[in-house]
Image: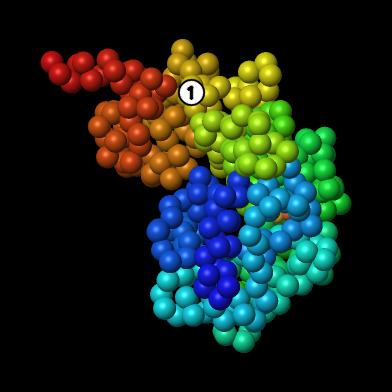
């Protein structure tokens, strides 16, 4: 196979992988291109065209959900680092790919595989002077020095936990070691950010770290996934978690398991943003008895129905923390409301709408100048 054919094969196989697939917000839409190039949002919100691919689809591990697992019968392909870097630069210079997400199957151990990924990144950064976005995967079994090197070269690194704890991981990927191979690199990344000078990193700031979970394959609950996520945000400087609804792959041990509904993945995203950006704690989230979020209502609205419907918040007096609890108002909306309040009293739902608030969503949970907005709208019609 020539290089383009291998890239096409690897990239299309990558899109079968449940990990960070097209349902992930970062890799959200896919152009039908000669190779698979996705439109992806960077951490700063900018959208770029992203080549998401593997250095090799050969793998010696046997994760039960994964299409690349050892022994599964399908056509595999491999790149050498210099060959891959040359091909990517060809696409980059042609304007087809502005950034790259590079992962790999594990071959000859995690350390060797990580060396191959690092060699590719070194060639891109130092031989080709590539200055675009680079997301590198950290392999299970990588060493601290390799994590440091990846963080020097990349904008973002990811260590995919896949499961929220060791017991769940053993049912999902029995050859992976939760603490030693997956949690430890995330901790090293945080230590590096805290203890080493960011001048060593290619842009003068350390790569951010993210992780990803396969949701719903082995009985994992939302409370398990979100408590691990919250710990990582607080203790390991995790930038964000990705959630991938389990989708069974033929010829894998989990092929007969039911797929996870996409709405569960969406609820996990909503809840993780509440924990990270809205001041919610795990105890605030409306888990049902079995430890899962309700699917029919988003978690912020469910919280507000219990806590604010009978006790609405006065928009003109509510604190920043209280405003963040109101459905339809996000962190930006809060800042806009606080600035507008310094100029005038907010008395009308339409004014909130003009400030960028989702006013109809907020209406059941707020007072405007002491009045419920619905009553106010009726009066306005008189
Ligand atoms: S290590 Fe596991 S998840 Fe990663 S490519 Fe290999 S089988 Fe798939």
Left or right: where 115 falls relative to 339: right
Residue at 68% over, 23% down: 291
Residue at 57% over, 50% down: 16
Where 341 sits versus 300, above or below? below
Left or right: where 375 falls relative to 10: left
Q: On the image, numbered disc 1 is attached to which residue?
A: 297
Dot 1 crowding, Cα within 10 Å, few <14, some 14–19, many 20+: few
Give coordinates of residue 180: x percent, y percent.
86, 51
Q: Quarter of the image holding residue 166?
A: top right
Q: What quarter of the picture does the C terminus occupy?
A: top left
Give coordinates of residue 165: x percent, y percent.
79, 38
Where 107 sits versus 25, above or below? below
Q: What quarter of the picture does the N terminus occupy?
A: bottom right
Q: Nearer the viewer, residue 2 or 220?
A: 2
Q: Kindly tell me whether residue 61 is visible in this rendering.
A: yes
Label 1, secondary structure: give it: loop
Q: Nearer the viewer, residue 52 or 278?
A: 52
Residue at 63% over, 41% down: 250
Where 211 sits versus 351, above or below? below
Where 201 sits versus 52, above or below? below
Q: Nearer the viewer, residue 198 or 255?
A: 255
Q: Nearer the viewer, residue 191 or 324?
A: 191
Give coordinates of residue 85: x percent, y percent.
60, 78
Residue at the left extreme? 382
């Amino acid at each position: 196979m020539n290089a383009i054919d291998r890239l096409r094969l690897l990239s299309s196989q990558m899109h079968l992988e449940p990990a960070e697939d097209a349902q992930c917000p970062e890799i959200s839409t896919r152009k039908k291109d000669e190779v698979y190039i996705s439109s992806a949002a960077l951490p700063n919100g900018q959208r770029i065209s992203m080549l998401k691919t593997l250095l090799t689809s050969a793998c010696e591990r046997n994760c039960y959900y994964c299409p690349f697992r050892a022994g599964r019968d399908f056509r595999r392909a491999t790149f050498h680092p210099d060959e891959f870097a040359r091909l990517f630069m060809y696409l980059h210079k042609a304007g087809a790919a502005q950034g790259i997400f590079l992962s790999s199957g594990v071959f000859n151990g995690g350390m060797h595989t990580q060396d191959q990924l690092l060699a590719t990144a070194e060639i891109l950064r130092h031989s080709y002077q590539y200055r675009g976005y680079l997301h590198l995967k950290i392999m299970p079994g990588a060493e601290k020095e390799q994590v440091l090197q990846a963080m020097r070269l990349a904008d973002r690194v990811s260590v995919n936990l896949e499961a929220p704890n060791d017991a769940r991981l053993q049912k999902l990927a029995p050859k992976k070691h939760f603490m030693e191979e997956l949690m430890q690199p995330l901790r090293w990344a945080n230590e590096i950010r805290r203890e080493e000078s960011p001048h060593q990193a290619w842009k003068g700031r350390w790569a951010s770290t993210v992780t990803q979970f396969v949701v719903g394959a082995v009985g994992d609950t939302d409370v398990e996934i979100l408590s691990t996520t919250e710990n990582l945000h607080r203790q390991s400087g995790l930038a964000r978690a990705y959630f991938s609804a389990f989708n069974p792959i033929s010829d894998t041990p989990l092929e007969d398991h039911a797929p996870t509904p996409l709405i569960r993945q969406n609820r996990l995203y909503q809840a993780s943003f509440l924990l990270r950006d809205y001041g919610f704690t795990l105890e605030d989230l409306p888990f049902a008895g079995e430890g899962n979020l309700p699917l029919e209502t988003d978690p912020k609205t469910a919280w507000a129905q219990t806590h604010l419907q009978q006790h609405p918040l006065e928009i003109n007096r509510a604190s920043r923390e209280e405003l963040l609890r109101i459905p339809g108002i996000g962190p930006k909306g809060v800042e806009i409301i606080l600035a507008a309040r310094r100029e005038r009293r907010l008395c009308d739902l339409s004014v909130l709408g003009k400030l960028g608030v989702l006013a109809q969503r907020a209406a059941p949970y707020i007072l405007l100048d002491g009045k419920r907005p619905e009553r106010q709208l009726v009066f306005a019609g008189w």
